[in-house]
Amino acid sequence: MKLAGALLITTALLAPLAAHAADVITPSRAVGTTHNCAAYYPALSQRLNESGDVLVGYDVAADGTISNVHILKSSGTSRLDSAAVACIQTYWRNTPATRNGIAVASPGHEAIIQFRLTGYQPENGAQSNNATASHAPRAAFHNPFATPVGTFIAGVGAAVASIMAIGWLSSRRICPNCGSANRSPFFRPSYCSRCGTKFEPSAKTA
């Protein structure tokens, strides 16, 4: 009888544990297409080329509503952080988690919202909840200061050297016959462009 009593007690104690171990849990899932926050990308952030990742925590209630949305890791920009919270609070929809077919609350969810402008690559391959926005390029125009500094300085130096060389190899000469001004090399004879008078390199310059 003692043995039978022990078996009955053991069976009674193990029965709830066995039932608990047999629970069928279904996690909460997104409703519809994959969550995306592109529509919440702040216009000012797009103009300022702001991008970044926001790690957000939230809870899903037994009726599927999302609550307790909070920042776990900031993107470094308050505008993007606020946009991520607003997107999850107002746009996301989930089915509730279930236990043995009964809806239950499921706290402690996390999501990474990646705000990226077109042409900007994420730091890693993760694409979960990737939020992108089109980014209009600036009108193309030539900006000399956009040229690498070394190249720009070298170009300016070459131009200055050319101007100095022209001035050194030629000068403004006054014709001794008609008095007109002529630009001609100072190291060889030249002729007046007006009257044709020849004047030597030693002719008066101005």
Image: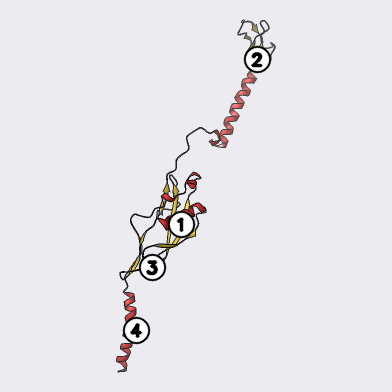
Q: Nearer the viewer, mark 2 or mark 1?
A: 1
Q: Residue, x 32% and y 85% (percent of image)?
A: 12
Q: In whole angstroms, how far apart are the C-alphas of marks 2 and 1?
A: 74 Å
Numbered badge on residue 13: 4
Q: Nearer the viewer, mark 2 or mark 4?
A: 4
Label 2 sits on what residue type? Arg
Q: Quadrant of residue 34?
A: bottom left
Q: Which residue is mark 1?
A: 85
Label 4 sits on what residue type? Leu
Mark before the other along the chain sequence, 1 or 3: 1
Q: Nearer the viewer, mark 1 or mark 4?
A: 1
Q: Which residue is mark 2?
A: 172
Q: In whole angstroms, how far apart are the C-alphas of marks 1 and 4?
A: 46 Å
Label 3 sits on what residue type? Ala
Relative side of 168 to 82, left or right: right
Q: Can you give x and y, in whole percent of width and height, for residue 82 in the image? A: 48, 55
Mark before the other along the chain sequence, 2 or 4: 4
Label 1 sits on what residue type? Val
Front-most of 44 and 153? 44
Callout 2 secondary element:
strand
Q: In whole angstroms, how far apart are the C-alphas of marks 1 and 3?
A: 20 Å
User: Could you tell me if the residues under marks 2 and 4 are in contact, i.e. CB atoms within 8 Å?
Assistant: no
Front-most of 82 and 187? 82
